[in-house]
Amino acid sequence: MDVDHEGLAPASILVAAGRQPRVPGAGLNAPLELSSTYIADGPVNYARAGNPTWSAFEEALGALEGGSALVFASGMAAIAAALSLASEGSVIVAPIHAYSGTGLILESL
């Protein structure tokens, strides 16, 4: 749901972003989706790739930051996604005391 949050205070964005349209009798907050698998041929097929709760969180975080956002099932999934965007010759800056798996991946590049 694309809504213009420009000019709103961060607290207002956090209260409004990521919510479904207001429908009488419907819940105001996005439900916490606990399913790990879904019926085939729908918009979501496995929770690791995203789910409705993540979508609401991505929308809220993106609105708060003034852009778009992605969330991941794990830190390694986020690291893999970020590294997949780096092309040959790219400079990657990371802290020395990052997660050890990250260090091993970066050392192998």
Image (spheres, rainbow, N blue to C red):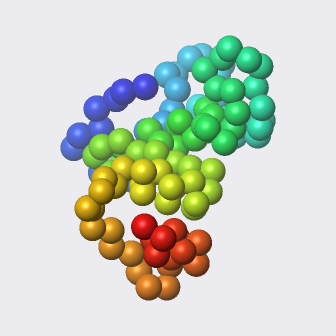
Which quarter of the rendered picture does the N terminus lie within? top left
Quick check: 47 above or below 87?
A: above
Residue at horizontal 52%, vertical 22%? 22
Q: Where is residue 86 in the image (x, y as percent from the top left)?
A: 34, 55
Q: In this view, does 28 lie to the left or right of 70?
A: right
Q: Where is residue 23 in the image (x, y as percent from the top left)?
A: 56, 17
Residue at horizontal 47%, vertical 51%? 81
Residue placed most toward the observer, 70 or 98: 98
Q: Position of residue 68 (x, y in %)?
A: 35, 42
Of all residues, the one furthest to the left in this rendering is 7
Residue placed most toward the observer, 7 or 83: 83
Quick check: 91 above or below 61?
A: below
Quick check: 50 above or below 80?
A: above
Judge whether residue 43 can be spotted in this image: yes
Judge whether residue 14 can be spotted in this image: no
Q: In this view, does 90 lie to the left or right of 80?
A: left
Residue placed most toward the observer, 47 or 77: 77
Residue placed most toward the observer, 100 or 24: 100
